[in-house]
Amino acid sequence: MGMKMPKVMGCSVENCAYNADKNCHAMAITVGEPAGDPSCDTFFTAEQHGGVMDMTAGVGACKLADCKFNKDYECSASGISVGMQQGQPDCMTFEAN
Ligand code: SF4
């Protein structure tokens, strides 16, 4: 059975360039750098916000092999949420194996 790309159901990191109204408008994000942290690698700040406004980001890749949703470095959760944790944008859906 094919895998479906999970969506970023919400992101509270409003200063990220891809964020509008607490939703992520990148086409896809990557989770998992620096190693061992479930942080959003796609986060960055810029003067203007970008992304595709009529799209909600998918989780294109996740490097957290120790998350229970991770299958061969892809995310198998039905959706994730992202939020600020200890000063970094983290996947809040991460659950250690
Ligand atoms: S999920 Fe990541 S890339 Fe998307 S708005 Fe939040 S911090 Fe930015």
Image (cartoon, rainbow, N blue to C red):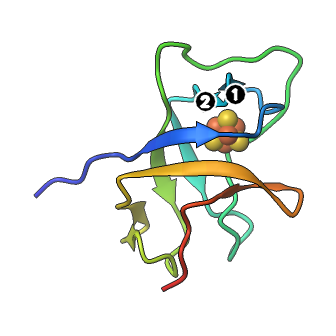
Q: Residues within 10 Å of mark 1 (few under 14, many from 20)?
A: many
Q: Position of residue 20 (x, y in %)?
A: 68, 21
What x and y, as percent, mark residue 37? 70, 70
Give the side of residue 48 with respect to residue 36, left or right.
right
Q: CA distance from mark 1 to mark 2?
A: 6 Å
Which residue type carries mark 1?
Asn
Spot occupied by residue 61 in the image (x, y as percentages of width and height):
48, 54
Disc number at residue 86?
Answer: none
Q: Residue at x 58, y 39 (%)?
A: 10
Badge 1 element: strand
Judging by the rendered image, the residue that carries numbered circle 1 is 19
Asked whether disc 1 touches disc 2, contact meaning CB atoms under 8 Å apart, the reply is: yes
Query: 77 left or right of 26?
Result: left
Furthest residue toward bottom = 97
In the displayed structure, 94 sits above or below 58; it is: below
Query: Is the residue at mark 2 in contact range of ligand 1, meaning its CB lies under 8 Å from it?
Result: yes
Task: Give the structural element (helix, strand or loop) at label 2.
Answer: strand
Please state which amino acid type lies under the numbered disc 2. Answer: Asn
Which residue corresponds to the image point at 47% horizontal and 47% vertical from the top-left? 59
Mark 2 lies on residue: 23
Whether disc 1's CB lies below 8 Å from ligand 1 is answered: yes
- 10 Å neighbourhood of mark 2: few (<14), some, or many (≥20)? many
Residue placed at 58% from the left, 25% from the top? 25
| Quadrant hosting ligand 1 | top right
